[in-house]
Amino acid sequence: MADLEKFRGALFGGACGDALGYPLQNFSVARIQHRFGPFGLRTLVRDVKNGKKAPVTDNTQMVLAEIDGILWADAKKLDMLDGIYRGFMRWYYSQTGEEPKRGQRTWMRRQPHEREFCLLREKFMHARRNPENGLLSAFAKDARGSVKVKVNDSKGAAALSRAVPIGLLYTGDSKTAFDMGVRAAALSHSNPIAYYSAGALAAMISCLSDGWTLPKAIERAEELLGKFHKTDPILTLLSAAEAQANNRPAGKSGAWDHIDSISSLGSGCEAHEALAIAIYACLAIDEPSDALIASANHSGRSNTTAFVTGAIEGVRFGEKFMPRYWADILEGAEPILFMADRLFYVYGKYHQ
């Protein structure tokens, strides 16, 4: 059985990683050192224009939108994926300001599950924070994406973050978590690399929340991946991440020990790269907060790699592994923890 601390840790850890990596996206190591010092960026950065809060990106926004959809499905007895799609479309309309499609206009109204709190009214959910190319256009299409209905050919790493709530919800049932993680990712990412990577992460989170060790959780995800075609690139990078962690553990001699290993796994722009980088950081670095920092300080899609790392370490160690003051400066900290609590409530209903 899972506990609330794991749910809070996963969502808060992911959001903190997202905020930590956001100012570093695609910076070279030299530029990171020039701007933030020889050890890189090691704490959240306040934005004066953002109410002195450290801003989050579409990673965190979509996780919250997905939980919104899960709560909606639970309250209205909808199919889970239907609820999730509604949550994603709400996020899409909030990002673009477009008029809802026919049949979706009522989705922008306050719903029965929102008596205590309405995510749609949170200002930060409407902020446009450099969402991944193709993400918004996927939701703009009339067709709803699936493994059979293609809306693009994106391998993008933005497919990963939404795997975290699914893994938590299906704690102890890694097969269902994998399948639902794939289906949720395919709503906006039609390349198997993206949606199977998301399924693998959902399975790992499901196992970790159930008390498994990280190596065992990775092994289970690899077992599930091995049953499908077109997953070889994901399995290859996961194996490479594990080998790098075993052969070149980071943090033993210097703050940048991780750079060569991370570079060998890619930029993190594609889903399997971001997943592999996060796995490497969690395996190679003993201290979870240092793993989170290392996963952000590289010259790729830092916010996503750090989100995934923070979520994995959060479900393993709880929210206490992060500096306490981060909660004071993280944008949306209270809504994030509230939504974590509500997700845990739905999980509890399914496991009575």
Image (tube, helix red, strand yellow):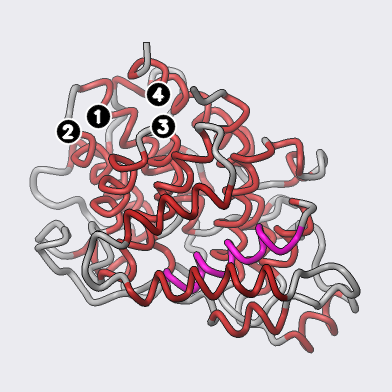
Q: Are marks 4 and 3 in contact (CB under 8 Å)?
A: no
Give the mark nearer the N terminus: 4 vs 3.
3
Q: Which residue is mark 2?
A: 79
The label nearer to you, 1 versus 4, is 4
Name the kind of residue labelled 4 in the image.
Answer: Tyr
Q: CA distance from mark 3 to mark 2?
A: 20 Å
Residue 47 image point, x, y percent: 73, 59
Residue 249 image point, x, y percent: 75, 69
Residue 37 visible from this viewpoint: yes
Residue 133 image point, x, y percent: 37, 75
Residue 275 lies, with reference to residue 85, above or below; the image says below
Image: magenta residue range: 271-285
Mark 2 crowd level (few <14, some 14–19, many ≥20, 10 Å Cα): few
Q: Which residue is mark 1?
A: 73
Name the kind of residue labelled 3 in the image.
Answer: Gly
Q: Are marks 1 and 2 in contact (CB under 8 Å)?
A: yes
Q: Which residue is mark 4?
A: 347
Name the kind of residue labelled 2 in the image.
Answer: Asp
Please name whichever residue, 120 or 192, is drawn nearer the observer in this view of the structure: 192
Mark 4 crowd level (few <14, some 14–19, many ≥20, 10 Å Cα): some
Residue 332: quadrant of the picture: top right
Looking at the rendering, in which quadrant would you find the C terminus? top left
